[in-house]
Image (tube, helix red, strand yellow):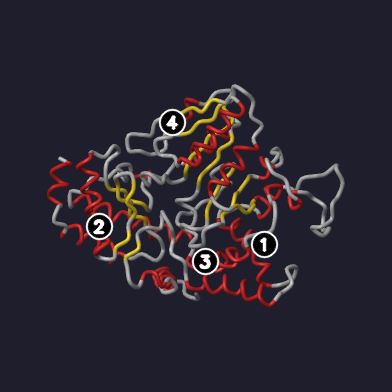
Amino acid sequence: MNTNNSTERLAQARALFPGVTSQIYLETSARGLLPKVALEAAMHFYEAAVRGDAKETGEAYLAAERVREKFARLIGAAPDEVTYTRNVSEGLNMIVASLPWQAGDNAIVCRDIEHPNGVYSLYNMRDRHGIEVRMVDATPDLAMPVDEIAKRIDSRTRLVMMSSVTFATGARTELARMGKICRERKVTLLVDGAQSVGALDLDVHATQVDALAVGASKYLCGPYGLGFLFVRRELAETLRPAYLGRFSINLGNAHEGVQGSEKYQLMPGAQRFDLGSANYPASNAIDASLDILQSVGIPVIENHVTALAGHMDAGLRELGIPLISGSVARHRAHIVVAGWKNPPAEGAALIADLSRHFAERQMRVSERLGRLRFSFHLYNTSDEVDAVLAAVAEWPKLLELATLRA
């Protein structure tokens, strides 16, 4: 893309996603659309494998290290602060399992709005090492309770885990404020970036995040089975991974088959978490997707998606749809969630009916926990928001929902 106009860049990017042509796709928080060029890039790898291209020099194999650098650049990190994962869950567990827990230590998490994968990784440490998992309640607008977490930190707190944007309510976390508190108290801040990286601008060092787990299949518009983990270099140097492989060990430029000795040195930074061969097909696919995101620019994408979410939020409120997202400005992001914190049975049934109403009109949204989640990315448009709002206005049961809400 060679234009400086953000509107034109967004339009050019949208044209690369065939999935937008026959539907309105507002389900990126569950799975992002894959651009056609990513499919082609993955096929180039398979073609190279069929030909028998050399692993050490073949272009399709070199994508893995290019992508490590692009992942790092995306979040303001250095390449040696990034390692590959299969998904967010693996990244979170890699950090949680490598911390030097002692019985009586504690970790803090907001179970109300945190993804179960992260919570269970802490329960595992509770059962293995005797740590305390401290639960805090979400804020009244169902966002991450930074002030309450700060109050619960004490001398035995080793970890705070939180999402940059919550999957449950779409609320944006005040990461920089939490990062400052954790750094001052010498507490590790581990962040689940699944619902933000690729859509919202983030500098991990400016926000003082210690570790960040991200999957490729949502806002990075990549395939399943690939993700990355950022670990701040100073923290990484203090950690001992739960698993080690040859790529975790620093033997300079020696071939991967070189054994080394029983006395070994771990790789610097996050590379000590590297294990075996990369997911090369997925690396090639995400390489192409990352180029699209970078060509538009993450700040441009953030402005675009938050504006669309604001448009949807205002329209749904005007129509009488109950929302559990967006009531506090600093917590608003690119996700709008309709429903209730604890949905009544009648409300959940109406939400399910509205979801079917959308599906009949080729409008894709996420229905879960008795709620509807509308999530926006660079390929969505204001016209699509208008179309969804028009569909809500035509829904036969709109008055029932408004009456139930009252």
Instruction: From the image, tell me which residue sits under label 1.
Output: 65
* Badge 1 amino acid: Glu
Q: Is residue 362 above or below residue 203?
A: below
Q: Earlier in the sequence, mark 3 or mark 1?
A: 1
- Mark 1 Cα-neighbour bin, 10 Å: few <14, some 14–19, many ≥20: some
Mark 4 against mark 2, which lies toward the viewer? Answer: 2
Tell me the element at label 2. Answer: helix
Contact? badges 3 and 4 (CB < 8 Å): no
Q: Earlier in the sequence, mark 1 or mark 2?
A: 1
Instruction: From the image, tell me which residue sits under label 3.
Output: 289
Q: Is residue 184 above or below residue 381?
A: above
Q: Earlier in the sequence, mark 3 or mark 4?
A: 4
Q: Earlier in the sequence, mark 4 or mark 2?
A: 4
Q: Earlier in the sequence, mark 2 or mark 3?
A: 3
In the image, is 161 to the left or to the right of 61?
A: left
* Residue at position x 32%, y 38% in the image: 141
Instruction: From the image, tell me which residue sits under label 2.
Output: 356
- Mark 4 Cα-neighbour bin, 10 Å: few <14, some 14–19, many ≥20: few
Percent x, y of residue 401: 17, 47
Q: Which mark is residue 149?
A: none
Contact? badges 4 and 1 (CB < 8 Å): no
* Badge 3 amino acid: Ser
* Residue at position x 66%, y 72% in the image: 49
Q: Nearer the viewer, residue 273 or 162?
A: 273
Percent x, y of residue 288: 55, 69
Q: CA distance from mark 4 to mark 2?
A: 39 Å
Which of the 4 image quarters holds residue 30?
bottom left
Q: CA distance from mark 1 to mark 2?
A: 43 Å
- Mark 3 Cα-neighbour bin, 10 Å: few <14, some 14–19, many ≥20: many
Q: CA distance from mark 3 to mark 1?
A: 15 Å
Percent x, y of residue 254: 84, 58
Instruction: From the image, tell me which residue sits under label 4.
Output: 147
